Amino acid sequence: MTEVLFYHLERGGVEGVLPDLLEKTLGRGWRAVVRTVSRERVNMLDNHLWVYRDESFLPHAGTGEGVDQPVWLTDGEDVPNKAELLFLIDGAKAEATALGNFIRCVTIFDGRDDEALSDARKFWKETKAAGHDVAYWRQSPEGRWEKQA
């Protein structure tokens, strides 16, 4: 059974929260795959993770080279780094029944986007029905994460 976490953004975008979540992931000794919706977005995230903070470094890759990096960026279903965590961002999808290879799946969605909110609700129902443990976190006005369900 996979733990599925839903992160409901209220302020800012995924670029503001993803690096911190990836740092926590690596701090636990886990590997991650970040799935997005396009190659352009993979390239943007690749660039962002190099410069998001001067004092930090997130080892990652998003092309054919570096497939053994702890963080893999993709617009597909590939997991060449044997990741334990799957991050779904920008509306990227996964089958609830296909999450068994991961310890955790983290879905980050923009709560100000009706389509993203609807997709997250649908995925919540699918993951519950598939028997996964689910939790819902919402961003407070101060930007902290508060567990809602």
Image (tube, helix red, strand yellow):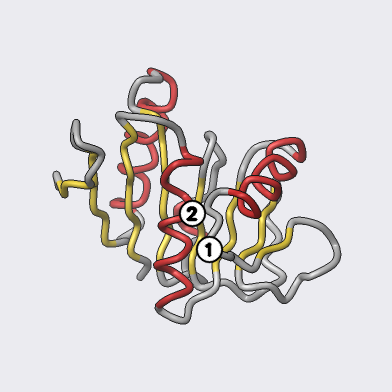
Numbered disc 1: secondary structure: loop
Q: Residue at x 85, y 67 (%)?
A: 65
* Element type where label 2 sits in the image: helix
Q: Is residue 96 left or right of residue 94?
A: left
Q: Is residue 68 left or right of residue 131?
A: right
Give the amino acid type for the residue marked by disc 1 in the picture.
Ser
The residue lying at 68 percent from left, 37 percent from top is: 41
Q: Residue at x 35, y 20 (%)?
A: 112
Q: On the rendered structure, is 14 left or right of 60?
A: left
Q: Nearer the viewer, residue 96 or 83?
A: 83
The answer to which of marks 1 and 2 sits earlier in the sequence is 2
Outermost residue on the bottom side: it is 29
The 10 Å Cα crowd at callout 2, few under 14, some 14 to 19, many 20 or more, is: some
Residue 148's spot in the image, x, y percent? 14, 44
Residue drawn at the location 58% of the way across and 54% of the way down: 34
Q: Which mark is residue 19?
A: 2
Q: Which residue is mark 1?
A: 56
Inspect the image, locate mark 2, and give the three-letter code of the amino acid beneath it. Answer: Pro
State the CA–CA distance, disc 1 to disc 2: 10 Å
Instruction: State if disc 2 and disc 1 touch (CB < 8 Å).
Output: yes
